[in-house]
Amino acid sequence: MEIIEKIKELDLTEYPIAQLDSLLIKAGKLCIMLTDLHQGKRVERAVNNSKEEPEFCKVSRISFKPPEFNNNYLRASTPKNTMFYGTVFSDDDEITENEMKYERIVGSTEVSTLMRNSEILEGWSRITFGSWIFEDTVSLATIIDPTKEYEHKYLNKLKKRYLIFLEEVPENVKENTLEWLKFLSSEFSKKVTNGNNHDYLISSKFTELFVNKGKYDGVIYPSVQASGYGLCVAIHPNAVSKMRLNYVLQCKLTKSQQEDGENHFLLENIKSWNVEKGVTQFC
């Protein structure tokens, strides 16, 4: 708790990178449960189109951002250290049919300003979704709070597995892990407004440390923008070789305001492509 309190006292607006690195290394022994995504599992990546790029045709454009263009801190990546961001859904049979309807909505809310910004009342944009298939196992650090009661059943089931998992470790390691997971989960679930990328410092630097020192493939955590519907993944570029793009769908997202003042969203399919294995361009 002493280390965590010192981290909380840091003025993140000043980007105290060296101090944060020093404190994170002193976290002590943690027992982080891994989530393995096996062969055949699917992850979906959403990418915004723009006026300059109204349509994507290259596989690389729906993959991770090249490191030289990654110049800011994001939820699980640091400048020059990029990650593949995407969304997955649990195979758990306790996910309701209604929750499964949110699968594409999760990706949209994670990338679309139109979806997230309540001050924008009307408008439209294009989003391209890439469906990636795992060809080998990818192991990700599971970032949830085992002390929290979640709204969704599958997250509570995951939490229960975490608690069972922690019963197998020494008591001091268990208690230390619980404190850190509670803290890290709050950082990974923090809603960050545009321009305040310093608020990503703790989650991004933890991910960097975990992946580089632990030699794991990345992290998995509940979707922030979609309030826990689905899980977000941040996968290191080295592990993207274990995945392949097999389907691309371009959609039009329209936002309008109803008479009662509520926002209405319509996500329409525009174009789709099946992607053959090994190609670099699909249209």
Image (spheres, rainbow, N blue to C red):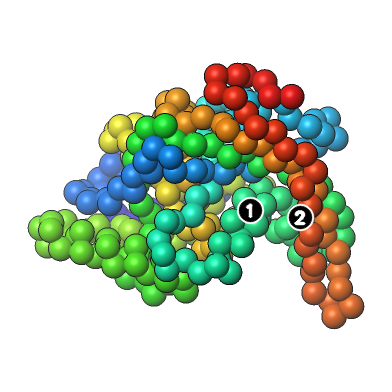
Residue name at image x 15 percent, y 63 percent: 167
Q: Which residue does the numbered mark 2 point to in the structure image? A: 267
Residue 278 lies, in percent from the top left, at 55, 19
Q: Quadrant of residue 282?
A: top right
The CA distance from mark 1 to mark 2 is 9 Å
| Quadrant including the N terminus | bottom left
Per the image, the residue denoted by label 1 is 104
Which comes sooner in the sequence, label 1 or label 2?
A: 1
Secondary structure at numbered mark 1: helix
Q: Nearer the viewer, residue 235 or 186?
A: 235
Residue 87, how many percent across, how many down?
53, 48
Q: Amino acid at mark 1?
A: Arg
Residue at position x 28%, y 36% in the image = 214
Residue 190: tell me if it is visible.
no
| Residue at x 27% of width, y 62% of height | 161
Q: Quadrant of residue 154?
A: bottom left
Three-letter code for the amino acid on which mark 2 is drawn: Leu
Circle 2 residues within 10 Å: few <14, some 14–19, many ≥20: some
Quick check: can you spot residue 147? yes
Q: Find out whether the residues at labels 1 and 2 contact each other: C-beta distance under 8 Å.
A: yes
Q: Is residue 57 above or below residue 199?
A: above
The one of 161 and 39 positioned closer to us in this rendering: 39
Q: Secondary structure at mark 2?
A: strand
Residue farthest left in this picture: 170
Could you say which is closer to the camera, residue 247 or residue 56? Answer: 247
- On residue 171, which mark appears? none
Q: Quadrant of the C terminus?
A: top right
Image vertical order of residue 78 relative to residue 253, above or below? above
Q: Image quadrant of residue 106?
A: bottom right
Give left or right: position of 204 versus 125.
Answer: left
